Amino acid sequence: MTSATSLYTAPVTTSGATLAPATVSGFDFKFALTFNGSSELTFAPVAQETTVSLSSDWADPSFTGAFLPTDRSLEPTKFSAHWLVPHLARSIPQAWSHFEQGLERIDPYQFGVRFIVPVDFYQLVTRAAKYAMMFLATAFMAVFLLELGSARHVHPVQYLFVGFAMILFYILLLSLAEQIGFLWSYLIAAIATSGLISLYVARVQGSAVKGLAMLLVLSLLYGLLYLILRLEDYALLAGAVAGFVMLTIVMFSTLKVDWSGEKARAG
């Protein structure tokens, strides 16, 4: 709401009669606005004393413009703010001719709030793609470890198929997130990818147990990835720690692997 100061006009004498001074007082008005796709709301301090009180259920406001709120309250699910701007705070007169200078002269003194989205689903998919190499290597290593305890060998082309399935996870995630949101898209893409790879490994190895083991590994991987993505402030730290732990597990679980083939030749 903006408040206007009362105006006063000098007495006017007409035919010997004196007219009373004309007084114009401020008035209140109220109307409803519907915003669609707006990213911010700003106000221009055109009154002698501009007072703005704003409250919203938006969780992440960003106060912008020439004046910050004199009082504000930030909560996890809502916020409220109050501005009080006197006309002395702006270097323009209380009145001017629109023909000489337009309303653009008030633009540098606007203030308000920007409704920001800290992390949208595009950013989440981008973050997930940054961990693609680590998760792809982990999936390959899981297939390799399952192959070591089996009489059947996995062909390099079959490893390539597993890699394609892992990459398709991100394509499914992005395409579905644009339609139904990130959470359900992540669940569908993770379940579809994990089920496909686990079933494929079970058929290749001829063992339902190894297929279930692969399903458990992928479930842990995608569950860990989702937790990392939801950590806005500690996503990088959590990803680095998770990568270090997975590398440690792989290194020590393959200590007895005959990488050079010396044992086979000696036998």
Image: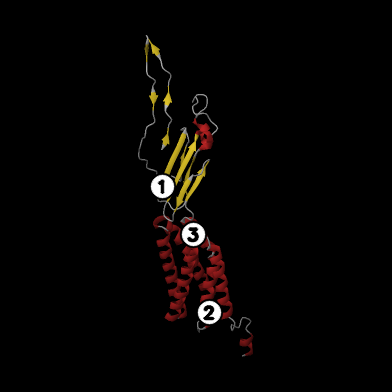
Which residue bears the numbered disc 1? 55
Which residue bears the numbered disc 3? 125
Which residue bears the numbered disc 2? 145
The residue nearer to you, when weighing 126 against 266, is 126
Viewport quadrant of the C terminus = bottom right
The residue nearer to you, when weighing 24 against 146, is 24
**Relative to 42, does residue 79 appear above or below in the rendering?**
below
Q: Residues within 10 Å of mark 2 (few under 14, many from 20)?
A: some
Q: Residues within 10 Å of mark 1 (few under 14, many from 20)?
A: few
**Relative to 176, does residue 23 appear above or below in the rendering?**
above
**Are dots 2 and 3 in contact, CB under 8 Å?**
no
Which amino acid type corresponds to the residue marked 1 in the rendered image?
Answer: Ser
Q: Find the residue positioned furthest to the bottom.
A: 267
The residue nearer to you, when weighing 16 against 216, is 16
Which amino acid type corresponds to the residue marked 2 in the rendered image?
Answer: Leu
Residue 99: x and y, percent? 50, 24
> In which image quadrant can residue 247 be found?
bottom right
The residue nearer to you, when weighing 242 against 27, is 27
Which amino acid type corresponds to the residue marked 3 in the rendered image?
Answer: Val
Whole-angstrom CA distance, mark 2 to mark 1, is 57 Å
Residue 53: x and y, percent? 42, 43
